[in-house]
Image (cartoon, coloured by chain):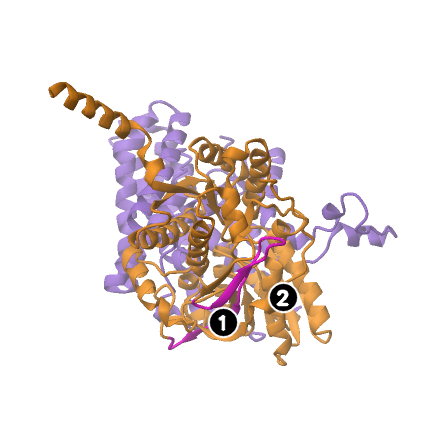
Amino acid sequence: MPIIRRALLGVALTLAALPAAAQDSIKIGYIDPLSGAFANVGELGVHHFQFAMDRINAKGGVLGKKLELVPLDSKANPQDTQIALKKVIDDGIRFVLQGNGSNVAHAIVDTLSKHNEREPAKAVLFLNYAAVDPALTNDKCSFWHFRFDADADMKMEALTNYMAKQQGIKKVYLINQDYSFGKAVAAAAQAMMKQKRADVQIVGDELHPLGKVQDFSPYVAKIKASGADSVITGNWGNDLSLLVKAAKDAGLNVDWYTYYAGGLSTPAAIGQAGKDRVKQITEWHSNVEAAALDEELDAYKKKYNEDFYFLRTRNLMEMLVKAFEQAKSADPVKVGIALEGMKHQTPTGEVYMRADNHQLIQPLFVSTMSAGMKRDVENTGLGFKTDGRIEAKDTETPTTCKMKRPSA
Amino acid sequence: MELVVFSLLNGVLYGLLLFMLSSGLTLIFSMMGVLNFAHASLFMLGAYLAYQIGRYTGFWPGLVLAPLIVGLLGAAIERWGLRTVHRFGHVAELLFTFGLALLIEEVVQLIWGRAPVPYTVPSSLDFAAFTLFGTTYPAYKVFMVLISIGMFGLLGLVLTKTRIGLIIQAALTHPDMVAALGHNVPRVFMLVFGVGSALAGLAGVIGGFALVTSPTMARTLGPIVFVVIVVGGLGSLTGAFVASLLIGIVQTFAVAIDFSLIDLLARFGVTVTRADTFYDLWRIKLAQLAPVLPYFMLVLMLIMRPRGLMGTRET
């Protein structure tokens, strides 16, 4: 008997020594900056995905397995991203999430396209929650890439549609960061405003170095001298906070049309200076009518002591789980095919994943920082108030994508 | 005309902010010969402490307490860190302060998190002080100007007109002689480093709400502070003051000028179009380059006149 018991123990130990995690969990890699200047942004993403996965796991996981988040540091540059991707591939992780930096997203798409062709048995699927360079779903589109945020052009389209209806707008000033995204925003704004409201004058088109300006008062003086009533900016982080603060100091009365005023510590830095003035275009904000989310928002804030910000991380995870279940498999090719054309009910309405270029089509919202809202942002006492809702179908833009699908 | 007045005023305001940031560093560098990489970190610490203290007591006690704490910390750093490292020469000192800067950044992240803290302009300073051509200037900027000029005046007076100032100056060039006369030279150095740190802390209290108080502020402000002291002349307080104003004004005026090489070529009848090679290079406007100009000045200064505008020595 003791011999048998010992043998059984031996077997049990051997089994335990095997990568047990691989058997009862589906690993999902996450590559974003976890150190350096943008570490807080990367950390925010980890919290959101961990939160979503915890809730899915609490309900029993998917395909009888638990989801497991594996965060890796991209250091916000393509070189270190390659190292992180190598680790993802070596560890047999088949799904990877990323959002911060379109340059990083391009690097992931390039590498995965080659890798997946070479080793189809170890293919990795890329789920992008925030990198908004339009090229990713146009010229550079790939079967292995799915985007869950609206791209920069779609957002500008929605924003300019809203602005075109505001008769008060006569003169618009563009100020953006001097790099690919800032230039894309400026170019899109120029073209679309001209097309939708020929009577609106673009009175300035400024580019400033990324993250180098401490004192925006000279820029504000220029905006003021131009007589602009509205400013469009793709600025984020300190570049947006300092700009709005300098404008408030100088008593500049303009409306700010932004992409990223709603989170990433910007509302806290802008504070009261943004009241009734700062607008944003997003897929969601905390005052969008969606009673279903109340409990989740509170639970998130309680757990991480910060505001829930990315609804798209929730949508992404829900759709991924649905794809797993439809495909009855955690194979990236099958999951990718299941995601194509998938329709999904979210708290803001129905969304769908375009099959032709893998871009999620979802409603967008233009909103303004206002007092007296039910939910405020970053303890400022100000919350976002919806000015306009752009229906999902109205955000669709033509694509130049010619997708190559895997033969399997 | 309006634009010139605005640019001048904004330039002076920005210049004085720069001087406020760099005065402590100039003091430490000129009196001790220590190039303190952790200066901007001490500045950041001042901002965070003022924010923290301000939450309990309001702004004004923080204005006094935060620099005091940073000053004491600076004295402690000199006493138990720098003094030991000093024996191994300048490279060791440099590495020590560099390490210190990284350490402070990590500690700040541990305590206050990676996101910026909501350190805003105190309500007693949050009103328009005066209006010029329809543009308002907030009271806190006037306050900042007063502090900055006050620092300059006081430091200048103390160093040149008082007994302690004379001892400090003598201790730099003739430490043995000063020690032989019965003065405690190490203590003089500790005092200087402490006061320099306190000035950084004070700048932080004001810079914290004028800019954004986040763990990256030290890293973003560090380089510009060095530009000021190098251009001003290593070891010259007046030089740093002049350099700050110069950088502030040059940068501000540059932003106002939308002039590119294309415009210059156009004067000579050459037109450049999108199709030309280097179009992206030609079309860069002076305004786009403005924030880079200080670093350009730094390089030029090091080539043409390594001791800076008013420097007294070359190291």
Chain coloured orange in this rendering: A
Q: Which mark is first along the chain, 1 or 2?
A: 2
| Region in magenta | A347-373
Question: Exactly how many numbered labels are in the figure?
Answer: 2
Q: Residue furthest top?
A: A3
C-alpha gap between disc 2 and disc 1: 15 Å
The residue at which mark 1 appears reads as A367
* Residue B79 x, y percent position in the rendering: 26, 34
In screen coordinates, is B168 left or right of A326? Answer: left
Q: Residue furthest left?
A: A1
The residue at which mark 2 appears reads as A157
* Residue A238 x, y percent position in the rendering: 48, 56
Query: Is residue B222 visible to the viewer in this orientation of the structure?
Result: no
The quarter holding residue A195 reads bottom right
* Residue B118 x, y percent position in the rendering: 36, 61
Residue at 30%, 58% in the rendered image: A305
Chain coloured purple in this rendering: B
Queried whether the magenta region covers residue A370, the answer comes back as: yes
The 10 Å Cα crowd at callout 1, few under 14, some 14 to 19, many 20 or more, is many
Residue at 45%, 35% in the rendered image: A88
Q: Residue furthest right?
A: B269
Chain that bears disc 2: A
